[in-house]
Amino acid sequence: MIRHLLSLVSVLIAALALEVSAQDAPETISVISSTFDHHGMVPEVNSAYGDNVSVDLRWANLPEGTQQLALICDDPIVVEIGMMEQPFVHWVIYNIPATAPGLPAGLPDDAQLDVAGLQGAVNGLNGLRRPGYFGPRPPANGQLHAYHFRVYALNESLDLAPGLGKAELLTAMDGHILATGMLMGHYERKE
């Protein structure tokens, strides 16, 4: 049991180090949504309290040499307010073709996506250890949470297998991130 805990701690430490190195990549990608503006409110329909419909995203200004894209959406506020030790992961998607201009709203939760323009893309594991999008669902305490939809441009087609979570994806992308960009939305539950 102790060996397992030590192994888990070392994986988390490595993931944190990789997250810091990913943050060193230039933030030059523009990420937008028709659903909400940067620093705007994520609509109820896109929350797990609503219909849990994934948001649409569009990106621009990909760096030259981009071969593939990935996306991680998480909520770092849970760490700041002491709810969790790591940001809660709401969406991981990778193997996105560099030719894709974005992600449409309402993507299925299937691990392997069979969507026009996204052939080969994979829904990774969210914080519930399930594939696909899991919308905002903070406690009903009126605390404003932040959802970081971060896009990564990669210099190589990694063609990663299904089943990766945030930590495993960050490990696989290490040394391949050309640039990033982020759209941040907020959500709070007052009831």
Image (cartoon, helix red, strand yellow):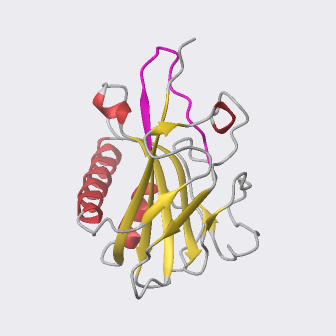
Magenta segment boundaries in residue numbering: 133-147
Q: Return the x and y of residue 129 as percentages of the image width and height.
A: 56, 46
Q: Who's the residue at 53% across and 16% down the image?
A: 140
Q: Who's the residue at 52% across and 56% down the image?
A: 32
The residue nearer to you, when weighing 18 against 42, is 42
Above or below for 96 versus 144: below
Q: Is residue 61 left or right of residue 46?
A: left
Above or below for 125 versus 27: above
Quadrant occupied by the C terminus: top right
Q: Return the x and y of residue 51 as percentages of the image width and height.
A: 73, 35
The residue nearer to you, when weighing 58 against 4, is 58
Q: Who's the residue at 66% across and 76% down the image?
A: 120
The residue nearer to you, when weighing 140 against 4, is 140
User: Can residue 144 be found in the magenta stretch?
Assistant: yes
Q: Who's the residue at 41% across and 56% down the image?
A: 182
Quarter of the figure with residue 87: top left
Quadrant occupied by the N terminus: top left
Q: Return the x and y of residue 124 as percentages of the image width and height.
A: 57, 59
User: Can residue 115 be found in the magenta stretch?
Assistant: no
Q: Return the x and y of residue 134 as percentages of the image width and height.
A: 61, 42
